[in-house]
Amino acid sequence: ANYLETCNMAMMGSAIVQGDCRGIVVATGNRTVLGRLNKLVRHQEVAPKRTILQLEVRRLVNGLTTLSLVVGAIFVILWAVWLRTKFPGFMSVSDALANGVGVLVTFVPGSLPISLTLALTAIAKRMQRNRILIKNLTTVETLGSISAICCEKTGTLTQRQMVVTRVAYADAEVHAAQVHVDNGVAARRVYETAAWCNNAILDPETAHLPAAEREATGDATDCALLRLATHMRAVQVPDHETLLTIPFSLRSRWMLTVCRTDETKNPFILIKGAPETLIARSTSIQNASGEIINLDDEIRSKLKEVQRRWADEGCRLLLLCRRDFAEGNNPLAELADSPAKLFVEAGKSVSQLTIVGLVGMVDPPRPEIPGVVDTFRKAGVRVFMTTGDYSHTAAYVARQCRIITSATVDGIDQVLDAEAQQPEEKGTKEVADDAVPASCKASNSDLARQESRADSQHTLTTPRSLVVSGPELRGLSTSAWDTISAYEEIVFARITPEQKLQIVEELRARDSYVAVTGDDVNDLPAMRAAHVSVAMGNGSEVSKAAADVVLLDNNFSSVVVAIECGRLVFINLKKVIIYLLPMTNLSEIVPSLFNVVFGLPIPLSTFLMLVINTVTDVWASVVLINEEPETDIMLTPPRNPKREKLVDVKFFLQAYGFIGLIQTLSGHIMFFLCLYLRGGIAPKH
């Protein structure tokens, strides 16, 4: 059972702040919510995962070691079979062993570990200047291979700050900006309910700022209403006194205050709460001009339609109401000095309410997010939203963030239809052409670019959008996941920690290199399963401890810098390695070979070779380490480490067969020239 979907479940450690109840234990140990998380984490691989760079360097070192042993063995065999028998006095056993050791030394560049460390350190400092904390230097290069990012909605893509965006009266829907400058009767009633029926307060540390710019502390909904009131500077209201406050509760689903002003001294009720609860207790409503009219069935239907439409647009809804009493017929008038009796009487008076307005609130996206998502799209990196919100809300926010850009959004039905249309193929996981939903079909040129993505992963030329909820993921087949992973714009809604982990594992199984952002313990299993885990600086200590990268400035746009640095370090490392290998390998092995075969003197001893490798080459490679990125570094698809290695056969051919030969030839020409000019020794001697 998904306990997070229930409305009558208390987690261990919850505090009961009001009322009484009887609790029944339904799960203990690993069956609880936290127990499941613990089980997921414990069942994951406990051994430290190797980064892509560690695997690449290990592969390089293994190759160089094998080559050095082979060439060293050849030198020893030449001495033992040929030189020792044909020219007994030319080379002793100790000289032969010294030559063999020299080959081993020259094949593995002594400056390579130092240069690698300097390159990673330089990139880490570059990231530090952008307020990015990298815990493991070798993780930097993995960032350059990221092809998919699973990010949380709240706090990562949004500001984690509710804002009132619209107000609905009986006859009009008004944008919040219009309410800010309105000074009519309707706006005054909205101000009184929003500001006086409120438990939020303005932060005292921002007292020096204008009221509209001050920060509020308290519940997110209360803070949003208080900020709305502080922006309504055109409204003139008298001083008031709050006689009673009944806090919001899940049972009543409303909050109530009893107030009176200095003008009338006649107490009245202000109340806010869930629309479905308060509409049933209301008998009248005000229009945009402040006139009170009867709440008939037509207006009730209109309010329900506004509720549905605003909810589809990602709004949280709240109804503002009030009840005024005529002087001489006010049951609250004589109870101002008796809080207990006032509490009882006010609770009985939650009826015959007048609706002041229906307000819609949203947690707006961070202003930089749409541009950041577009940058990722140009770089071939897919951005997926994972959230616990409902599908309609998540899809609306995703469209604001430009995670969803296509006009048509598919659902699980299209995925299942595509699965049914797929031809049966054994031994492959590739999605057939007719597995693409009909609503996602693109032009011929777009399809051609999609086919080229097999060699350059995720060019993202054809936006295709999918919104799927957590319960719909249960029991999906492998082919269905193949179809889902082919989409370029995906929103996963109503996701549990287990399902988020499943999403990461399914993407990894299809050769995607995944980064996961998280700020809570619920994200821990998915973060540990991802190639790179990213935590926000204001997240929980658990998430920051498990993350590979921490965004100290809580800015999702810093991930762009991190990926750019990951791509840059890969390019610079290739430059450093292709510089060091010919300099320290071929150009130093050939003199040893000439010494054994032709009897030429060795230009450098083993000690001098080490000095040159460690000292001179490092300083020269610093220039390559600190090279700036190219202007198109974020306009190319991400590197697939399985196809594009740090070093491969082509790389070695260029290093040894082209650059190495030029360096070796130039070095020997200079060596023989010095022998001739300084000692009069010519090659014929």
Image (cartoon, grey):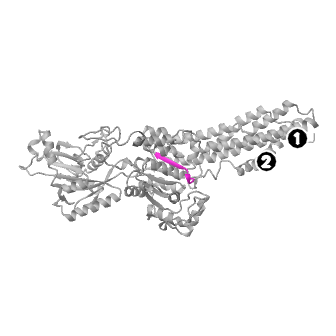
Label 2 with label 1: CB-CB less than 8 Å: no
Query: Three-letter amino acid code at disc 1?
Result: Val
Residue that protrudes farthest toward the bottom in the picture = 444
Q: Left or right: where does residue 117 sit relative to residue 605?
A: left
Q: CA distance from mark 2 to mark 1?
A: 18 Å
Specify few, some or many for label 1: CA neighbours under 10 Å numbering under 14, 14-19, or 20 or more.
some
- Residue holding disc 1: 597
| Residue drawn at 57 percent across, 46 percent down | 142
Q: Secondary structure at mark 1?
A: helix
Q: Secondary structure at mark 2?
A: helix
Residue that protrudes farthest toward the top in the picture = 94
Check the image and report above or below for 158 versus 20: below
Question: Which stretch appears magenta?
Answer: 509-517
| Residue drawn at 21 percent across, 56 percent down | 279
The percent position of residue 54, horizontal first and vertical second, equals 62, 42
- Residue holding disc 2: 661
Query: Three-letter amino acid code at disc 2?
Result: Leu
Q: Is residue 186 among the parts visible in the rendering?
A: no
Give 531 or 4, whichever is nearer the viewer: 4
**Mark linked to residue 660:** none
Which of the image's four quarters has the C terminus?
top right
Q: Left or right: where does residue 3 sit relative to residue 124?
A: left
| Residue drawn at 63 percent across, 43 percent down | 55
Give 627 or 311, whichever is nearer the viewer: 311
Check the image and report above or below for 310 versus 22: below
